[in-house]
Amino acid sequence: MFRTIKQIARVGIITETAKLSGATLKHYTTLQRDIYSVFGRALGVRHVDAGSCNGCELEIHALNNAYYNLEGLGIRFVASPRQADLLLVTGPVSRNMLAALHQTHDAMPEPKWVVAVGACGIDGGIFGRNYASAGGVDAVIPVDAWVPGCPPQPEAILEGILAALVKPNAHTG
Amino acid sequence: MKQSQTGISIQPLPGAAAVRYACVSATDLRKICEETGAAKGTLQSIWACDERDRDGGFRLWVALADSYGLLLLELPMTAENPEYPDVSDLFPAAVRLQRANRDLFGVRVNGGDYRPWLRHAAWPEDVFPLRRDHPADTVYPEEADRYPFVRVTGEGVHEIAVGPVHAGTIEPGHFRFSVVGEKVLRLEERLGYVHKGIEKRFESFAIFEGQRLAARVSGDTAVAFSWAYCMALEGLCGTLPNQRALWLRALLLERERLANHLGDLGALGNDAGFAMGLVQFSRLKEDLLRTNARIFGARYPMDAVLPGGVAVDLSNSGRRELLNALTPLENEIAVLQGIYADHSGLQDRFVGTGRITSALAVQLGLQGLAGRASGQAGDLRCDHPCAPYDQLGVRRVILTAGDVAARVAVRFAEAQESMRLCRLILEGLPSGELLVPLQEPAINRPGIGWVEGWRGPVMVFLQATSDGRIRRCHPHDPSWQNWPVLEHAIIGNIVPDFPLINKSFNLSYSGVDL
Ligand code: SF4
């Protein structure tokens, strides 16, 4: 126990301010307050892998590490789509995941946002469209923001989440 | 070279991997499999090819691993009756591979498990998308998906169905538990959800660009798969990369192994209720990825391995930075290992949980790091070392307890060994060209790449067309072997321990769904 506490104390707080581009940076600084004023609680984010290579998942994991301190910004990953406000979808949508992706999206309460993560989420990426791949996420469900990259860096994913939330005509159903 | 009992002619294949090749009859195939199994050899992979455009038939390919390396067997089959002998009684991992062959090519064994594996509802039963005359982009209307799970009946038995979408940020798959109270009687996995036509997609790639797709077969194994792809291609071209390029590939591969072990060690702590472990290991992993970004230009250097060499170089200052970071990382991991060892709550969850005995590991063909936690010594870096591993003297890690604790201990030991290897590589890095030009690839024989990825051995089988494209590429991840073993690891354990047991294997979905 002593060693655990010593380790925690030695490492200290390593959270940084995310290095975001101009447009989203403005919202980043007021994000926690804005989320609270709209939702009265943290923003719930749910992830669905709709056919990815698992590369994008690694960077979503990274977004949850202490450097980015997502929860400190008022963004929380939740275990069920019913608790989620925003859906992160990775991968080209494999046709074997069509039903599950629809069900997950349907289970989310309104209003809801969708962010397609990675080159694959945009248009199928390197896998393209074929007998088994339906291509990009918006071929299947409406998408509010897209995050380029293969895989995108954690900050780009955060930027995508912010972009979806502040979009003027955000899709709400 | 001759195989003693069967009298079949066996030839070595050119390339960095130790591979022998033979064309066999169905009887001989079965006989060689029996002999190999009896001599403690293992099944590496089974796949099919459509050669009807060349000679009117199909092929079955079987790769067996024995003490000499890989034995590659090619069995011609007619188009009218593409049947081959079932070898799943010898190698249980064959079952799903054989089912996948049927879904994709319509080649089949006589008997056995006839349920589809990769085919869910996206194409009809009489359509075989990997046949050459099947266009890649034909899309069929969604079918009804009624998969016949095996039912366990008895007093008090009920089913728990989980997935394909799970609570965390992980890949999709379905798990069907049959339980009594909290105890698991049986687990049946159903995978294939992320099947996205990778093998078909390869056939639209220029052969000198296929490594990009290979790197994305399973994104956490990008270096291993792209290296295996390039090794196969370099074998076809009859060229070996320069030593410097090979040493840099090994540096990237060991860093990939390290990154995955750091991530999993943290997640294993978290799954056993020790969130601090996740926080600390995620920090170390993030540091490693940021160093990758600075030195190699990408947090995940997915496109660093190229046919003929590598796309990245290491300056003297970069070399020093990597070397300087090693000792602090070694110390950090040692501190955390001490904390894990002292934490009675963690040890209580780890020890004895999800045990695979050595005997069961042999029987089921458990591979890679999970195998090495259950007494299976296989490690390509030690058994059939290609450059630079032949000059590094990799120290094999092997434990026998076979439980979560053993798989955690193997990761700690292999992480330390990877750091030792990184140091050796950084200190001994030879000079030389990063890329050498490649000749035109041979079209009359296959190329094989075989690399010890962080989960275990990955293999790539590659054939070229005469106009510079990929004729056929089959990537094989060791998760094919290890997924069925996970079904055994959970038996007798309680359902809440499943995430922990599952994470201790951390198998690939994309790498087997393809
Ligand atoms: S965008 Fe790249 S990393 Fe993400 S799923 Fe696609 S191939 Fe993998």
Image: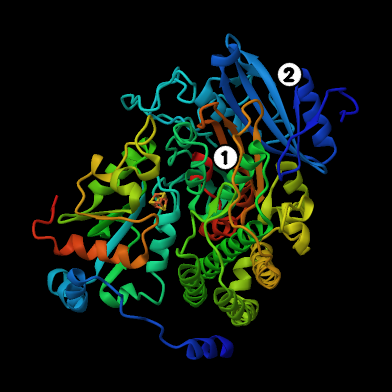
The residues tagged by marks 1 and 2 sit, at their Cα atoms, a distance apart of: 24 Å
The residue at the far left in this view is A169
Which numbered dot is residue A160? none
Mark 1 residue element: strand
The residue at the far right in this view is B4
Q: Label 2 crowding class (10 Å Cα cut-off): few <14, some 14-19, many 20+?
A: some
Mark 2 residue element: helix
Q: How far across and how far down the image is residue B22, in percent? A: 76, 26
Judging by the rendered image, the residue that carries numbered circle 1 is B475
Q: Quadrant of residue B76?
A: top right
- Disc 2 residue type? Ala
**Residue at (81%, 35%) from the top-left corner?**
B36
Q: How far across and how far down the image is residue A77, in percent? A: 33, 64
**Residue at (50%, 41%) from the top-left corner?**
B210
Judging by the rendered image, the residue that carries numbered circle 2 is B26
Q: Is residue B28 left or right of residue A64?
A: right
Q: How far across and how far down the image is residue B390, in percent? A: 77, 57
**Residue at (53%, 53%) from the top-left corner?**
B222
Relative height, residue B147 to residue B299 (above, below) = above
Q: Is residue A27 left or right of residue A8?
A: left
Tell whether label 2 touches label 1 (CB within 8 Å): no
Q: Chain of mark 1?
A: B
- Disc 1 residue type? Pro
Q: Chain of mark 2?
A: B
The residue at the far top in this view is B80
